Amino acid sequence: MKSVWQFILVGIATAGAIIGLDQLLFAGVSRQVIRALGAQPVLVRCAIIVFAAIREELIYRLGVSTLIAWLAALALSRVGPVQKTIAIWIGIVVAAVLFGLPHVANLPNAPHRFLRALSLNGVAGIVLGWLYWNGDLRRRSSHTYPPMRSSISALRVLSERHCA
């Protein structure tokens, strides 16, 4: 298992890259969302961060990325030997783009809001997708969320059969 510190450093570096890109390309417009979140009571902030993170990881990494990687592996196997890395990266990129779309509404009046949401959240989505596939989270997902074990086991089996 990879060191937890590696993942923490990847998270810090990703946050720094996103903040830097936001400042460079979009004049730091994302600070509005951060300030609005900072104005909330501490418990509300924690609830928003924790529940949003869990929901987004379940939907985009566990659901979308796994399903798209499985479908890509299935499609690629019909034209030749399956390249699991290609299938996984297709799943990561598609999930990252879909992850960025709902974030367009975070700043409805921001200039280039689609480009901003897709690029900044796309960076996060790609890193989170990479962590999902390389950080042993995919194999642990059914143990992390026991109530969802039966609903995700089919996706896990399919992804391991074609992408692992």
Image (cartoon, rainbow, N blue to C red):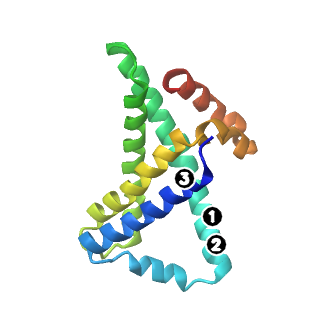
Give left or right: position of 128 versus 76: right
> Which marked residue is nearer to the observer: mark 3 or mark 2?
3
Instruction: Locate residue 26: give its quadrant.
Output: bottom left
**Extreme bottom residue here?**
39
At which x and y percent is residue 16? 41, 67
**Is there a contact, CB below 8 Å, between mark 1 and mark 2?**
yes
How would you rate the neighbour count of disc 1 (Cα within 10 Å): few for under 14, some for 14-19, many for 20 or more?
few
Residue under circle 1?
50
Q: Nearer the viewer, residue 144 or 6?
A: 6
Q: Identify the residue shown where x is 64% and y is 72%.
A: 46
Residue under circle 2?
46
At which x and y percent is residue 14? 43, 60
Dot 3: what SS? Answer: helix
Q: CA distance from mark 1 to mark 2?
A: 6 Å
Instruction: Locate residue 39: give its quadrant.
Output: bottom right
Q: Identify the residue shown where x is 71% and y is 46%.
A: 145
Instruction: Identify whether 108 is placed above or below 144.
Output: below
Q: Tell which circle, 3 or 2, labels the residue nearer the N-terminal end.
A: 3
Instruction: Locate residue 107: give its quadrant.
Output: bottom left
Q: Identify the residue shown where x is 67% and y is 39%.
A: 140
Dot 1: what SS? Answer: helix
Q: CA distance from mark 3 to mark 1?
A: 21 Å
Instruction: Identify whether 52 is placed above or below 156.
Output: below
Query: In the rendered structure, which amino acid carries the disc numbered 2?
Result: Cys
Q: Identify the residue shown where x is 59% and y is 56%.
A: 5
Quadrant showing the N terminus? top right
Give left or right: position of 42 versus 122: right
Residue under circle 3?
6
